Image (cartoon, rainbow, N blue to C red):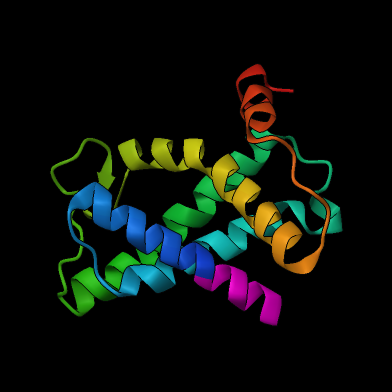
Amino acid sequence: MKKILVIGFIMGMVYFTLEGFWRGWTNISMLFVGGLCGALIGLLDEAPKRYNLKIWQQCILGTLIIISIEFISGVILNIWLKLNIWDYSKRWGNFKGQICLTYSFLWFLLTPLAIWFDDWLRWKFYGEEKPYDIKEIYIELVTFK
């Protein structure tokens, strides 16, 4: 559990920082939302039942994880608490302004990077198996291997 918390915190910090650069600002809650998403996505290739999943299948699951957490946290943070951290209501394919198809596609494309980064952190900090080359992972994704 400690390992997952450490990896989740690191992934949350990375997401928090990247979102700050992407949008020009962010909210501290994104540290936790991004960390939770990252930690859960990182587990996609860790559970023995999941070893046989192709990368495109992991991307679908990762995207579902992200948009589920994004929607739930959006309802809590943006609608109930009125923090107005993000609003996709003007984007095509949005649902209640909290998730949208455009970013869902982006999450699909970024999921392999999150999986690889989780594996890299496990390798560097915990001596686990060295991760595959990130280029190989994306080649597998586009070729549906």
Residue 55, x across and y down, in percent: 68, 36
Answer left or right for 7 relative to 99: right
- Could you say which is closer to the camera, residue 79 or residue 134? 134
- Could you say which is closer to the camera, residue 128 or residue 63? 128
Give the residue drawn at x 45%, y 43%: 107
Answer left or right for 67 relative to 58: left
Q: Is residue 98 visible?
A: no
Residue 95, x across and y down, in percent: 28, 50
Q: Is residue 7 magenta?
A: yes
Q: Is residue 56 magenta?
A: no
Question: Dominant secondary structure of the magenta stretch?
Answer: helix
Give the residue drawn at x 83%, y 41%: 52
Q: Is residue 72 visible?
A: yes
Q: Which residues are magenta?
A: 1-9
Q: Residue furthest front?
A: 124
| Residue 140 higher or lower than 131, as above or below | above
